[in-house]
Image: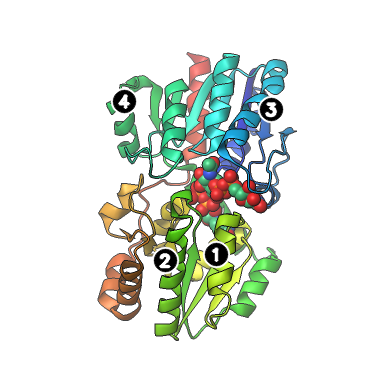
Amino acid sequence: MIKNLIVFGTRPEAIKMAPVVKEFLKYPDIFHTKVCVTAQHREMLDQVLDFFEIKPDFDLDLMKPHQNLYSLSSSIILGLKPILETFKPDYVYVHGDTTTTMASSIAAFYSGSNICHIEAGLRTFNMQSPFPEEMNRSVTGVVSNIHFSPTETSKNNLLRENKLKDSIIVTGNTVIDALMFSVNKVKNLNYQDTEIEHLKRILDAEKKLILVTGHRRENHGAGFVRICEALKEIAVDNPQTQIIYPVHLNPNVHGPVYRLLSEIDNIQLIAPLSYPAFVWLMEKSYLIVTDSGGVQEEAPSLGKPVLVMRDTTERPEAVEAGTVILVGTNKDKIVDEANKLLNDAFAYKTMSKLHNPYGDGMASQRIVNYIKSILKS
Ligand code: UD1
Ligand code: UDP
């Protein structure tokens, strides 16, 4: 029996690892699979665990208000030590580029386990942007034995770093597996969701919906002030729009956003949504404005144009296809691009193409099949 330990800690990792967990659990005769959450996020992680009905075997319960990178990284490494020493996994699976990803992969390396990096090879080649994620994924890449890359572009990034060709497997991004699971579940006539019912009550069908999310560390401070000023101007200049913004719980985001945007009539600030409610709202939206990595991947599959409030992206595929535009945190650029999409039907239509550069919903199956194939050989 092969022992798997799947480790994650934040909302996006949980969303993208949930389909992998479910796929491994289909084969209890081959794999003894355990889930460990660091709980780098607490409430936002638990929302995802509830929706996907995942009960972790280990919960390090590490989140602290205003946590910092030093203490979080060291607590993850120390917290994983006894689990790795007692369970002795053959394979440890980590995802993406958070502090949980980087610190867990280092702990797994110390333990001698094989390390599988899911969503491997995303790069901006700028260590400061996104910070600290570019470092996190690069370090994880160094210690990983198997790299599950979502796209050919990410595979090529790893080849440029001299990773062995045979260690890189292109699978698509598991976020599309999660997205399809969620869309199908919500479509089921028996599905009931109090958050979606609440959203139906606050949505104004006469107005164009702009959905906003944001949290990037490099945008904290002046960047978020400019973002809020831009959103305010868009809302005031376009009374026929409604902006809904589920605000990230990071105090560096929550603080300025509520301080600067609470009083605008057509801006609604709400708590982070559960995954199905957020997906439902993405489908209802006219335009998405975000600095999120995951949302950049999901939106093209739903045919929604995205303005990305970052200067760089490790996800160039949708930018190249013309459905995502990088606007940084420049107030005028955000306002100009949003106004163009709100008022120019041709520009909007050109950006609203439905396409799937990030996956086809089969990524988790490819990952599990690959591990099964190694066992046979
Ligand atoms: C983290 C990741 C980032 C990822 C993002 C996804 C790092 C360094 N950052 O950023 O890569 O894109 O998650 O959202 O790994 N908080 C809560 N409840 C929660 C979650 C967060 O209260 O459920 C608050 C806490 O005060 C916490 C703070 O947010 O200390 C910051 O959380 P942290 O994980 O350090 O940073 P994020 O900005 O969430
Ligand atoms: N998301 C969610 N609820 C929200 C906002 C976002 O479930 O209120 C989902 C979104 O669909 C995507 C993921 O969270 O899958 C993105 O997480 P986040 O932006 O926090 O992190 P990133 O992807 O930038 O690392």
Rendered position, 298 above or below 243: above
- Residue at the disc numbered 3: 79
Q: What kind of element bears circle 2?
A: helix
- Residue at the disc numbered 4: 161
User: Which callout, 3 or 2, points to the residue nearer the camera?
Assistant: 2
Rendered position, 126 above or below 331: above
Image quadrant assignment for residue 135: top left
* Left or right placement of residue 251 versus residue 341 in this view: right
- Residue at the disc numbered 1: 256
User: According to the image, what is the colour scheme of the structure?
Assistant: rainbow
- Alpha carbon separation for disc pair 4 and 2: 36 Å
Residue 271 place in picture, x, y as percent = 64, 64
Residue 114 place in picture, x, y as percent = 53, 18
Residue in the image at 30% along x and 66% along y: 351
Amino acid type, callout 1:
Pro
- Residue at the disc numbered 2: 226
Callout 4 touching callout 1 (CB < 8 Å): no
Q: Is mark 1 within 8 Å of ligand 1?
A: no
Amino acid type, callout 3:
Gly
- Alpha carbon separation for disc pair 1 and 3: 33 Å
Q: Which mark is residue 32?
A: none
Residue in the image at 65% along x and 47% along y: 45
Amino acid type, callout 4:
Glu
How many residues crowd around disc 2 within 10 Å: few (fewer than 14), some, or many (20 or more)?
Answer: some
Residue 4 seen in the figure? yes
